[in-house]
Image (tube, grey):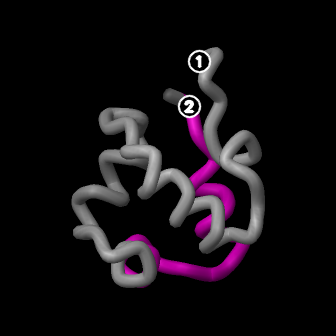
Amino acid sequence: MRNRIPQLRRDRGLSQAALAVALGVSRQTVISLEKGRYDPSLPLAFRIAREFDVTIEDVFDPRE
């Protein structure tokens, strides 16, 4: 699934490692999410959206 995580992360000045800590996941998980190789669970998707103060739809595009 396409997502805007890399853009949102860069806009906030966060490293992949810092985002991983904030979300409670590994850096490898953040990398996989950013590359679209891993679709997050619903609870993780909510945590990602909350971290960036946006809606889930603003982060993920289910049509892709």
Q: Pointer 1: what residue?
A: 64
Q: Pointer 2: what residue?
A: 2
- Mark 2 to mark 1 CA distance (whole Å): 6 Å
Which residue appears at 67% of the width and 47% of the height?
56
Kindly identify which numbered label has been placed on residue 37: none
Could you say which quadrant of the image residue 43 lies in?
A: bottom left
Element under disc 2: strand
**Marks 2 and 1: CB-CB under 8 Å?**
yes
**Circle count:** 2
Could you say which quadrant of the image residue 22 lies in?
A: bottom left
Can you say whether 4 is above or below 15 in the image? above
Query: For this view, does 35 lie left or right of residue 58?
Result: left
Please provide the residue range marked out in magenta: 2-19
Which residue appears at 52% of the width and 65% of the height?
47
Mark 2 or 1 closer to N-term?
2
Farthest front residue in view: 43
Query: For this view, does 29 lie left or right of residue 56?
Result: left
Query: For this view, does 55 lie left or right of residue 42?
Result: right
Mark 2: amino acid: Arg
The quadrant the C terminus occupies is top right
Could you say which quadrant of the image residue 41 lies in?
A: top left
Which residue appears at 56% of the width and 31% of the height?
2
